[in-house]
Amino acid sequence: MEKSKVYFTGDTGSKALVKLYKKLGKELKGNIAVKLHSGERGNQNFLRPEFVKPIIDEVNGTVVECNTAYGHDKGGARFNTNSHMQVMKEHGWTENFDVDILDSEGPDKVLEIPNGKIIRENYVGKDIDKYNSMLVLSHFKGHPMGGFGGALKQLSIGVASSNGKCWIHSTGKSKDMKNCWQIPVKQDEFLEAMADAAESVNNYFKDNIVYINAVVNLSVDCDCCHVAEDPCMKDIGILISTDPVAIDQACLDLVYNSKDPGRDHFVERVESRNGRHTVEAAEALGFGSRDYELINIDEE
């Protein structure tokens, strides 16, 4: 069986995103959603609009986001559409792109997960039906709960509606933001629920989805943190693939094999949350492979 191809460049300039997309040779068609992280108010590490503008313009995409499942008590300012759009305005998204909050209006769209290990349905914003293709544009970094965040987290927590985020975090026990955080869950089951949800979105778009991971601003904290640690490692590069499992595995390998002095701090965050289990669980579901071929386009 042919290995999944993951293309890499050490060039972290904005034009490198377009170069990688053209090298991949997979043209997204129709109405294209570009799923990215708008960045929590106060966060300093999220990918900036000027960095991603060349690739979004290249595909003529619409920036899509979803509301969060935590409010002001946890430092959140993106838990409802009005507040979220205000943050997107502050961060420069609305002045540069068309923006769509997928779950701005209910009811949610339910994606079935027949072979899900933990959850059998995923709740996403109904506006997802507007789009024929998706470019998943992820900032690869650490994460307080998942250990790391990349393509799989963007597919799962990222695309889930506010209710859907609660559903994943509670491992299928609650869609209510008021109580889902109070429900005790097993860490591995949470990671497996993320993998389940990621599969449903990947399968929804079938072959019309591409993944880009920018391995830059390598903080151990997520862009959802309003108070986040500064990056602990130097930027590594940018990767692209049609396989979300392969691209996340490749990013983890690049970090683990790094000689950067901050490498151990980052790896501790991943290991302490058993973060690699998300990739293992996703591979077990069969919508991607950890066995990949890394193609460095800088050497061509």
Image (cartoon, helix red, strand yellow):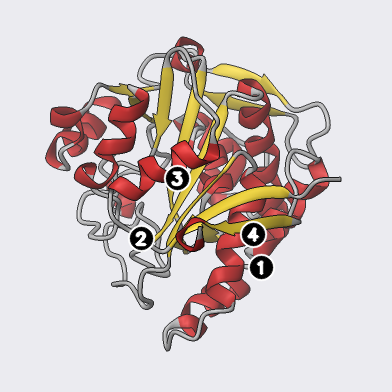
Mark closest to the chain's N terminus, 3 or 2: 2
The image position of residue 146, as x and y in percent, is: 56, 59
List the residue tagged with mark 4: 249
The Cα–Cα distance between marks 3 and 4, rounded to whole angstroms, is 18 Å
SS class, disc 2: loop
Q: Residue at x 40, y 58 (%)?
A: 222
The Cα–Cα distance between marks 4 and 1, rounded to whole angstroms, is 14 Å
The Cα–Cα distance between marks 3 and 2, rounded to whole angstroms, is 10 Å
SS class, disc 3: helix
List the residue tagged with mark 2: 11
Task: Estimate how packed mark 2 is, as few (under 14), some (14 to 19) or many (20 or more) residues with alpha carbons within 10 Å.
Answer: some
Mark closest to the chain's N terminus, 3 or 4: 3
For marks 1 and 2, give the one nearer the viewer.
2
For marks 4 and 2, give the one nearer the viewer.
2
List the residue tagged with mark 3: 20
List the residue tagged with mark 1: 274
Identified by mark 3, the residue type is Leu
Identified by mark 4, the residue type is Gln
Task: Estimate how packed mark 4 is, as few (under 14), some (14 to 19) or many (20 or more) residues with alpha carbons within 10 Å.
Answer: many
Q: Residue at x 38, y 14 (%)?
A: 105
Where is 227 relative to 292, above or below?
Answer: below
Mark closest to the chain's N terminus, 4 or 1: 4
The image quadrant that residue 223 belongs to is bottom left
For marks 3 and 4, give the one nearer the viewer.
3
Viewer can see residue 286: yes
The image quadrant that residue 45 belongs to is bottom left
The Cα–Cα distance between marks 3 and 1, rounded to whole angstroms, is 30 Å
- Assess whether mark 1 and mark 3 are in contact (beta carbons under 8 angstroms): no
Mark closest to the chain's N terminus, 4 or 2: 2
Q: Residue at x 78, y 36 (%)?
A: 116
